[in-house]
Amino acid sequence: MAAIYERDYVKALDYVDSWEVDDEGRLDRYTYKESMYGVTHRMAGQSDLADRNFRAVSVLIEAAIENVEKKPPVAVPEEHFIHLIRLAEAYAGLGRAEEASVLANKAIEMVPLTKHAVWGAVIRQEAIRQVFVVAGDYDAVIAHLETYLATPGM
């Protein structure tokens, strides 16, 4: 979405409008259109519209997490930790910084870099960029960046 980097939010929203979603309103297994609308509106300074979308996606993701938590545990709980990061992103967008940080840290703990190099790196990057920075938790940003950069191969 180059339009975001160009700060052409109207074009970015038009682009999101054009995306096809599945029967559950998702762009892919874990990303809801409302999340993309929320992020774009937040970046455009349209907090009311961002909040509306973040609230809507929070309800969807909370239900998805509830369904995942009913399933038997798996070795790499991809579905669970990705939903946690998406919910943390929505909470951060809504100004619920503490809750967002708790969820992001929970997702990171589920996939430590020492056991899951790829997923651990992906979730840590997402948490830093989409949760901790947005929530203003700069101590967490620094701490997680230090851990990430100290890991061989990162």
Image (spheres, rainbow, N blue to C red):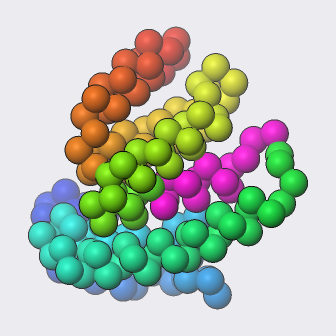
Q: Position of residue 149 (x, y in %)?
A: 40, 18
Q: Decide whether residue 82 is among the magenta residues.
A: yes
| In the foreground, 148 or 102 | 102
Q: Which quarter of the rendering shows the N terminus?
A: bottom left
Residue 14 point in image, percent of width and height: 28, 83
Q: Main secondary structure of the magenta part?
A: helix
Residue 153 lies, with reference to residue 49, above or below; the image says above
Residue 12 in sight: no
Magenta extent: 75-87
Please report the residue visible at 13 percent of the width from the left and 64 percent of the height from the top: 7
Q: Residue at x 12, y 70 (%)?
A: 45
Q: Is residue 123 above or below residue 37?
A: above
The residue that appears at 38% across and 61% down in the rendered structure is: 91
> Does residue 83 appear anywhere in the picture?
yes
Q: Is residue 143 left or right of residue 20?
A: left
**Which quadrant of the structure image shows residue 55?**
bottom left
Task: From the top left corner, tell me how far across and down residue 109 is, in percent.
Answer: 59, 34
Place of residue 144 in the rendered image (x, y in percent of width and height, measured from the top left): 40, 27
Whether the magenta-drawn stretch holds residue 145 is answered as no
